[in-house]
Image (tube, rainbow, N blue to C red):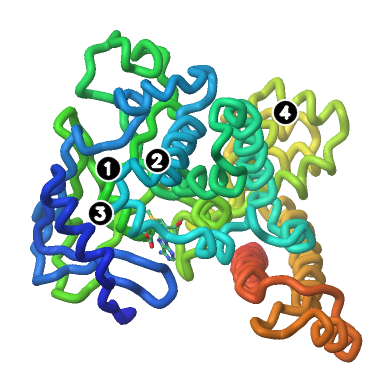
Amino acid sequence: MAAALDPGEPHTKFVTWAKENGVDINGIAPARFVDRGMGIVAAKDIKKGDRLVHVKNTSLIHAALPAIRDLQLPENVPVHGRLAAALALWYSDAEHQEYKIWQDVWPTQSDFQSTMPLYYAQELQNLLPHAATTLLNNQSAKLEKDWEDLRRHIPSISKELFMYTWLIVNTRTFYWTYPDLPNSHPRLPKKRKQLTADDCYAMCPFMDYFNHSDVGCDPQSDSKGYSVAADRDYKAGEEVYVSYGSHTNDFLLVEYGFILDSNQNDSIPLDHLLLSLLSKEQADALIEDGFYGNYTLSTKEPTTCHRTQAVLRLLILDNRRYSAFVGGDDDGSKEQGKVDQYLEGILTKYSRRIMDISEELEHLKPDVPGEGKRERRQSKRIANVKSVVKAEHRDVLIKRWKQICDILNTTIEVLRA
Ligand SMILES: C[S@@+](CC[C@H](N)C(=O)[O-])C[C@H]1O[C@@H](n2cnc3c(N)ncnc32)[C@H](O)[C@@H]1O
């Protein structure tokens, strides 16, 4: 069990504020952890099913709040950007005290800088795994677009501050469908039927202290608000996690800035390995059959999905055998050995490429705090290393590639057996 440390005064003040502002807390408390900032611990022995926290609907912060609508931010901008703009305006306004005590317990800008891939040096971003690269490109495009669409409406806010509150929203929001409002209400971001996941963001003070685990409590919402009940018994002092969803480590890394040591939901995409092997005709056939792309290798059995089995068969079998497999007329067991052998070759090649990437990462010199530019230049020359990056960024990336290699090697062993 990781040591839980005293959270410090701002957190004690925040808990008092939360209790006075619609948050009901039972048997849990915030605590500081060495490797993941704040989290929640059991303050006493807890029984499975006990309600640990309830946040009233009126205490949530979301786009339908009058205080946010009054800012008259353009409605075509996604809720994520509008919430970030509101938080930035409140954060920078000394007169606006309503959420000050909550803001005081947020992670700092420097916490984000040391964990989020958005802040990695370009050369490290270039070495992210494929899935993480796609997610990071999307995230970065969304942030830039929100900033471009909003900057004229919030002239007092710097991009740096906007980026900070945008990441606060990114890492601390909950899914909220405004169940306390009628289906058509002027304060709903859209008519209820038209709401998409991008409209359903709510910030939930205190609930946002919970860290994530692949097995954890499952937050629930209804028109009265948000709550968390214990998923199992806990002993006093144990950390209580919630699950943010069935996320892979690449997703957790880009969206939240961490990876789990063990993650039953982890998987890696194979599209970048398989799509390039297809001829135009094969790609067209897969599109027509609904099997183009989205091929994954997971940590759970069976490690390859049905889609992957389909594309591999198209690549190495005659069309008749492929069609029998995707049409469901044949389970494909007759050719399984041949398919496994082919996949084993592809994965072995990828695993060798990862060894090269890991070596490249090892040669990027980590930034040593306190070391000046001159010393860095000198030690770069002496050690024949290429560049200077943040040690914590580089190390998490080395660890992630090692996890990917382990998934590949486990699968290769299974395919060989
Ligand atoms: C909703 S907040 C949770 C509270 C947060 N730890 C804090 O200090 O305020 C989400 C952030 O917590 C951290 N986090 C959550 N779960 C984690 C875990 N299992 N391991 C490491 N960091 C985690 C990540 O920095 C993530 O972006």
Residue type, mark 3 in image: Cys
As drawn, 150 above or below 55: above
> Residues under labels 4 and 2: Cα distance?
51 Å
- Mark 2 Cα within 10 Å, few/some/many (few <14, many 20+)? some
Check disc 2 and report the residue beneath it: 90
Residue type, mark 1 in image: Glu
Dividing the picture into quarters, in which one does residue 343 lie?
A: bottom right
Q: Position of residue 191 (x, y in %)?
A: 36, 11
As drawn, 202 above or below 205: above
Foreground tag (3 vs 4) = 3
Check disc 1 and report the residue beneath it: 98
Badge 4 or badge 1: first in the primary sequence: 1
Disc 3, disc 4: CB below 8 Å? Answer: no
> Residues under labels 3 and 4: Cα distance?
39 Å
- Mark 3 Cα within 10 Å, few/some/many (few <14, many 20+)? many
Q: Secondary structure at mark 4?
A: helix
> Residues under labels 2 and 1: Cα distance?
8 Å
Q: Position of residue 201 (x, y in %)?
A: 38, 34
> Residues under labels 4 and 1: Cα distance?
55 Å
Residue found 89% across the figure and 91% down from its top: 382
